[in-house]
């Protein structure tokens, strides 16, 4: 290693004044770069970050920074100078291998700052040189770190095994201790010259790694030359880069001798090499399919190229860059044997992808040289940079290589596009892929083409170096089957569903008696699952939760509620079915003797179904906390034309999802559609098309529901469910509490939670990961054994997801089913080609909790009321209190926290079911104004109130807007249940945000309301759409928000319609599909 002693002496004499003058010149030319990677591409993921750059050409407006800052894919960036002037910058060039790249800006845009370009002086770098690193270190606008160059021949740092790494170059090392944000900083000497480019550091020490500038100077000179020739048409800029697809390491002479280097060759190399040469270049790896594949091997020692001794990376790359598409002759030694190898030099840019396919949120492109080197695959194969929804749903991970699709071999991206154009929505086709983690084994999965318009049509994005943007165009022809909407034909409007023998009920209609005073007396115990309402905030980051039934990140939705009226005295049930069902019972009883299964298990098995639910990341509404759910449900109605199954809302959380049903009675998977989500009770109803069962249609049956009599303490039940492998599992258990009151607090990110609900507890079950049904000894369903989701504190301050299972009495489900079958009064929904009216549910939007009468007495409740409530319910001995009213509800301004609900219409109230009965009674009174006459106890006084109720449907949230990469919706029920809406017209709710979007770049995160845009109120989604529709591309927008904690905030963000157009997703009940409508986008051809 050569040390320039004269220069060292000169530098050591640099005074503080010398450094002050140098920094005065340098600092104005250093900029803070805020970059946003709009899409995952090659080695980079989508996201927003800060870095540093510096002006190297003032007249042309060229900024030098790192390659990992410029990004290989779509990027939007701004530069902020030291006086806080901000200007947009556009990528000019990013080197395919080395960690440098250039941005350009309009020099005329800088109005108030005087600055000079920083000259590049790579020849000045020497060991012992005192330097300063000027940049945006650790997020600071300007930071100056001192150091001394210690090495000029450090091996290129290894950052990630599956990400960007530099190679075939030396790095400079110093102990300057740079941190995040300083990437791209100039490393200057006392004269203000840049001698190196800061690139990385080691977190375990103060070591910093700088890129030498020789290759940077060459690239900058070529850009200037092309600029002078072609003007500002930067797409004409050509920087020749040649490659053999080989990685070399510089090894010392001692190591090369051990590898087989002969002493004669070593003597020749030492004689012709520059003074101080310490080693030679040795082959480290060869990319399969490249020019050197099967010609060079790891351990080969490079002697000469075209007869010229080469021991340095710089000389090697110069020869390759000057011989693109030409042949070179390499002399190597392999194990002491001298060999001559002739190789063609490949154009490095030809194996660097400059386009990608975006389909269903996935980003696919040809495998780059960078990743081919990391993974040892051929360049150009179809590479999964981001799996998106369609591929991640099938289990295809990031960094995969697609080998086959729909039975067709895939060798390049065009092959995949050709196959994709032949497929139709909803089709399921095999896909074969390989991962570098398990590279010797191909994996096969089933990919489901999106049935709904969760994402835009497939597009090809291509890099345009002239504009700095990536332009989009359709990837498949407009007449492709994939682009044709699958609309239902032969739509029939019906007012009710004919009751078939396959819908099984125990005889005896449920009659509602309004004033007979017959109320069920069941024990209620409060369940201790309470915790803080919410703490902190959550972001859009998807966190994998390896819990019972969800993996990913998701929420719930708004629905409707059904309540149960008073029930007649119930006689001993007698199973009544048609002759076919009777024959089936006989066969079941005969089968019992041949197996170890109980009668209940045999009877219920044809009705059990496993649900697998996927929620698209682009439309995760209502705070849904996962993208993948699974759980066991039961079929409650089944005919030749329609089937209905019920499952808990911890499995089917939102209607904006894809549901797959697997049946225990027959090995088949078919899709389902969510048709009803109960707003209070923890269940959802899913419809399926029985024709999809094929030959298995006769094997599948609806369960017999036994809504009455209600389960009592000490009664025996059979807990029956399915394992993940669809094996039926059951056990006999005893009811310990038939009416335990739930008390689940709000999650940190509000999502559906069961409230005002009484559940069944058992003495033994299969743990929190097992769901199913509770049946009697004859297999008749008495309750749905359901999963509930909550958040609890374990140790620290953070909340963790917790799941538990409890039973939901089947009467709550059978009442809604009755309304569906008999013809509901709600809006029609298309189910299997039939328009069927769905029920509306009247609820009191108030969260209640039970309090013992002994506690109520301490609050001042009179002995008269205590006696009346105890007489009404001598077992419970409780009164309901108000925990809070839903914001925006009709009860909000009438009931207050702590109010005791004593009676409705003079009838004492002791349990949640009493409230539901009263709401149902309002529905039966045609002239009702929807108000309940409630007697409450408040602060020592008995008060009579008229309290309004609310009517909800079972659709959940059916509309959302994606604006600047954020998911905007009207506040859903879980948010309103917090009891607060902003005073400024309520506002629209920001549910989620996407990485690499404008809202990510400017910090407009989730869990807040947007109440104003550019000073205009946005009280609802329609008004918000009207406001943002008038905003233009590149326009800065002033947004006023209110967080869930009530804190207001005003921020600005820059709208980007190029990569993040504004679009709406809305459920169309006439076609039973989710429709995507483009609101505003930028013409991608400009």
Image (cartoon, rainbow, N blue to C red):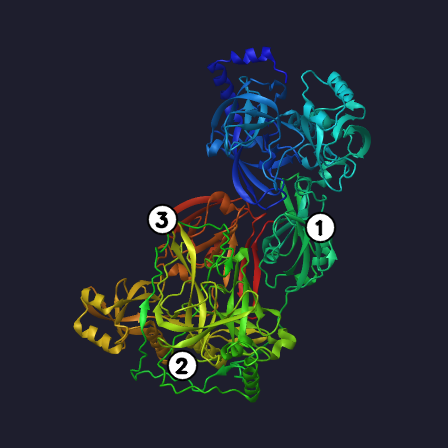
Instruction: Identify the element where label 2 is drawn.
Output: loop
- Compared across the picture, whether 158 is left or right of 979 comes to right
* Number of residues whose C-alpha sits closer than 10 Å to that of mark 1, classed few (under 14), some (14–19) or many (20 or more): some
Q: Which residue is under mark 1?
A: 413
How far is the residue under mark 2 from the one under mark 3? 49 Å
| Residue 374, x across and y down, in percent | 65, 40
Q: Which residue is under mark 3?
A: 1047
Q: Quadrant of the C terminus?
A: top right
| Residue 104, x across and y down, in percent | 60, 33
How far is the residue under mark 1 from the one under mark 3? 49 Å
Camera-near label (1 vs 2) is 2
How far is the residue under mark 1 from the one under mark 2? 60 Å
Mark 1–mark 3 CB contact (< 8 Å): no
Question: Can residue 1032 be seen at all in this image of the molecule?
Answer: yes
Q: Is residue 929 above or below residue 898?
A: below
Q: Is residue 213 above or below residue 160?
A: above
Mark number, residue 708: 2
Of all residues, the one furthest to the bottom in this rendering is: 579
Mark 1 vs mark 3: which is more N-terminal? 1
User: Residue at image x 42%, y 53%?
Assistant: 800
Q: Quadrant of the N terminus?
A: top right
Camera-near label (2 vs 3) is 2
* Number of residues whose C-alpha sits closer than 10 Å to that of mark 3, classed few (under 14), some (14–19) or many (20 or more): few
Instruction: Identify the element where label 1 is drawn.
Output: helix
Mark number, residue 1032: none
- Compared across the picture, whether 266 is left or right of 518 comes to right
Mark 2 vs mark 3: which is more N-terminal? 2
- Compared across the picture, whether 860 is left or right of 693 comes to left
Q: Nearer the viewer, residue 59 or 414?
A: 414
């Amino acid at each position: 290693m050569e040390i320039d002693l004269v220069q060292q002496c000169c530098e050591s004499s640099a005074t503080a004044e010398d450094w002050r003058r140098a920094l005065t010149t340098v600092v104005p030319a250093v900029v803070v770069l805020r970059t946003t990677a709009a899409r995952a591409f090659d080695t980079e993921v989508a996201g927003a970050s800060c870095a540093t750059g510096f002006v190297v050409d003032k007249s042309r407006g060229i900024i030098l920074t790192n390659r990992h800052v410029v990004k290989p894919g779509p990027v939007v960036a701004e530069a902020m100078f030291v006086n806080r002037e901000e200007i947009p910058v556009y990528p000019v060039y990013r080197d395919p291998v080395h960690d440098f790249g250039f941005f350009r800006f309009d020099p005329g845009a800088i109005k108030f700052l005087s600055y000079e370009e920083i000259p590049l002086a790579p020849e000045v770098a020497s060991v012992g040189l005192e330097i300063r690193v000027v940049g945006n270190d650790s997020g600071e606008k300007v930071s100056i770190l001192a150091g001394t160059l210690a090495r000029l021949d450090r091996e290129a740092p290894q950052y990630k095994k599956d990400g960007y790494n530099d190679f075939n170059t030396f790095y400079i090392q110093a102990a300057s201790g740079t941190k995040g944000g300083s990437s791209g900083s100039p490393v200057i000497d006392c004269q203000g010259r840049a001698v190196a480019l800061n690139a990385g550091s080691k977190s375990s020490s103060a070591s910093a790694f700088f890129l030498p500038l020789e290759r940077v100077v060459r690239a900058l000179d070529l850009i200037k030359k092309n600029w002078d020739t072609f003007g500002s048409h930067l797409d004409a800029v050509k920087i020749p880069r040649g490659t053999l697809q080989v990685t070399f390491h510089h090894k010392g002479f001692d190591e090369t001798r051990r590898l087989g280097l002969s002493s004669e060759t070593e003597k020749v190399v030492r004689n012709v090499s520059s003074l101080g040469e310490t080693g030679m270049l040795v082959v480290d790896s060869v990319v399969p399919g490249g020019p050197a594949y099967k010609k060079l091997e790891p351990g080969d020692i490079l002697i000469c190229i075209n007869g010229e001794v080469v021991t340095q990376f710089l000389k090697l790359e110069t020869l390759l860059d000057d011989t693109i598409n030409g042949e070179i002759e390499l002399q190597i030694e392999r194990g002491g044997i001298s060999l001559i190898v002739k190789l063609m030099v490949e154009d490095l840019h030809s194996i660097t992808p400059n386009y990608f396919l975006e389909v269903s949120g996935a980003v696919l492109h040809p495998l780059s040289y960078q990743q081919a080197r990391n993974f040892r695959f051929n360049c150009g194969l179809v590479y999964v940079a981001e799996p998106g929804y369609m591929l991640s749903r099938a289990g295809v991970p990031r960094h995969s290589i697609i080998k086959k699709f729909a039975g067709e071999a895939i060798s390049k991206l065009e092959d995949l596009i050709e196959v994709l154009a032949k497929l139709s929505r909803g089709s399921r086709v095999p896909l074969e892929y390989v991962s570098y983690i398990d590279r010797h084994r191909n994996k096969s999965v089933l990919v489901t083409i999106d049935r709904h318009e969760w994402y835009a049509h497939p597009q090809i994005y291509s890099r345009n170096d002239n504009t700095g943007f990536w332009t989009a165009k359709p990837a498949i022809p407009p007449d492709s089957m994939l682009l044709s909407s699958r609309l239902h034909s032969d739509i029939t409007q019906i007012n009710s569903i004919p009751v078939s023998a396959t819908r099984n009920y125990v005889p005896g209609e449920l009659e509602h008696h309004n004033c007979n005073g017959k109320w069920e007396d069941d024990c209620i115990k409060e369940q201790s699952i309470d915790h803080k309402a919410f703490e902190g905030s959550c972001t859009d980051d998807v966190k994998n939760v390896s819990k019972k039934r969800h993996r990913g990140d998701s929420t719930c939705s708004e629905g409707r509620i059904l309540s149960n009226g008073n029930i007649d005295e119930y006689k001993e049930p007698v199973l009544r079915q048609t002759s076919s069902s009777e024959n089936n019972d006989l066969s079941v009883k005969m089968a019992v003797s041949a197996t170890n299964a109980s009668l209940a298990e045999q009877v219920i098995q044809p009705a059990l179904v496993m649900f697998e639910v996927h929620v698209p990341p682009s439309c995760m509404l209502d705070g849904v906390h996962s993208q993948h759910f699974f759980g066991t449900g039961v079929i409650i109605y089944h005919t030749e034309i329609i089937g209905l199954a019920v499952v808990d809302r911890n499995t089917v959380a939102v209607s904006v999802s894809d549901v797959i049903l697997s049946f225990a009675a027959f090995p088949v998977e078919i899709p389902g559609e969510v048709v009803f989500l109960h707003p209070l009770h923890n269940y959802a109803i899913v419809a399926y098309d029985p024709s999809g069962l094929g030959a298995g249609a006769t094997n599948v049956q609806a369960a017999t529901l036994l809504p009455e009599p209600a389960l009592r303490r000490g009664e025996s039940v059979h807990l029956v469910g399915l394992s993940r492998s669809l094996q039926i599992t059951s056990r006999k258990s005893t009811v310990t509490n038939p009416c335990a009151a739930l008390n689940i607090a709000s999650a940190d990110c509000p999502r559906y939670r069961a409230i005002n609900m009484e559940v069944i507890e058992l003495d033994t079950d299969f743990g929190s990961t097992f769901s199913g049904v509770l049946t009697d000894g004859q297999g008749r369903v008495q309750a749905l054994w359901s999963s509930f989701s909550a958040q609890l504190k374990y140790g620290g301050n953070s909340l963790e997801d917790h799941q538990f299972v409890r039973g939901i009495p089947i009467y709550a489900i059978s009442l809604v089913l009755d309304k569906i079958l008999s013809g509901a009064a709600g809006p029609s929904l298309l189910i299997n080609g039939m328009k069927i009216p769905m029920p509306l549910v009247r609820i009191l939007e108030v969260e209640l909790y039970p309090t013992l009468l002994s506690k109520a007495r301490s609050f001042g409740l009179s002995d008269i009321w205590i006696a009346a409530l105890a007489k009404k319910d001598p077992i419970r001995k409780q009164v309901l209190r108000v925990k809070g009213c839903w914001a925006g509800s009709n009860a909000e301004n009438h009931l207050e926290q702590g109010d005791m609900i004593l009676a409705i219409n003079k009838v004492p109230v002791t349990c949640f079911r009493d409230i539901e009965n009263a709401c149902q009674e309002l529905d039966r009174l045609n002239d009702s104004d929807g108000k309940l006459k409630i007697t409450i106890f408040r602060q020592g006084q008995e008060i009579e109130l008229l309290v309004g109720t609310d009517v909800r449907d079972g659709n959940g949230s059916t509309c959302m807007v994606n604006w600047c990469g954020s998911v905007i919706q009207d506040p859903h029920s879980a948010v309103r249940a917090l009891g607060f809406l902003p005073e400024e017209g309520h506002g629209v709710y920001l549910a989620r945000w996407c990485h690499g979007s404008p809202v990510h770049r400017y910090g407009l995160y989730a869990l807040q309301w947007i109440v104003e845009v550019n000073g205009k109120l946005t009280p609802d989604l329609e008004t918000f759409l009207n406001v943002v529709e008038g905003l233009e591309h590149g326009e800065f927008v002033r947004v006023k928000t209110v967080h869930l904690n009530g804190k207001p905030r005003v921020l600005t963000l820059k709208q980007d319609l190029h990569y993040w157009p504004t679009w709406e997703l809305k459920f169309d009940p006439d076609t039973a599909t989710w429709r995507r409508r483009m609101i505003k986008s930028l013409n991608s051809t400009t």
